[in-house]
Amino acid sequence: EDLTMMQTKAGELDCYDFVWTAATELGQQVGRAKILDDGEYHYVLSAGTTDKHAEEYHEIWNGLFDSFGIA
């Protein structure tokens, strides 16, 4: 209930982007996801890592999530 999603448009698709953190047995985890909604289906890309690696994956994730789409 405390998750804030950023809603945008990509052409005719509704896009929802969000990040989250979670405490696990392995330590603090960081996740990021993007949902594309074409009105019929939802397409989801998600990625996760430990908080220690989140900064080094930041640019990689930006490229990955920016390229995610429906052809």
Image (cartoon, rainbow, N blue to C red):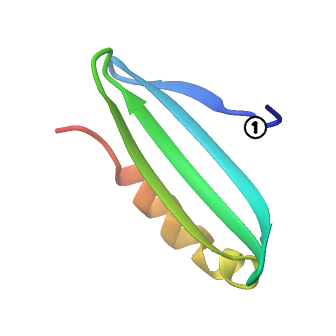
**Percent coordinates x, y for residue 11 in the rendering:** 34, 22
Q: Quadrant of the C terminus?
A: top left
Circle 1 residues within 10 Å: few <14, some 14–19, many ≥20: few
**In the shown orientation, is residue 46 left or right of residue 51?**
left
Along the line of sight, which residue is nearer the eye, 38 or 59? 38
Residue at far left of view = 71
Residue 8 lies, with reference to residue 39, above or below; the image says below
| Residue positioned 76% across, 37% down in the render | 3
Residue at far front of view = 25
Quarter of the image where one finds residue 63: bottom left
Q: Which residue is labeled 1 in the image?
A: 3
| Residue positioned 77% across, 60% down in the render | 21
**In the shown orientation, is residue 44 left or right of residue 28?**
left
The amino acid marked with disc number 1 is: Leu
| Residue positioned 75% across, 84% down in the render | 52
**In the shown orientation, is residue 44 left or right of residue 29?**
left
Q: Secondary structure at mark 1?
A: loop
Along the line of sight, which residue is nearer the eye, 37 or 26? 26
**Percent coordinates x, y for residue 45 in the rendering:** 42, 51
**Percent coordinates x, y for residue 57 in the rendering:** 58, 76
Q: How many marks?
A: 1
Q: Quadrant of the N terminus?
A: top right
**Percent coordinates x, y for residue 30 in the rendering:** 70, 66
Residue 45 lies, with reference to residue 21, above or below; the image says above
Quarter of the image where one finds residue 65: bottom left
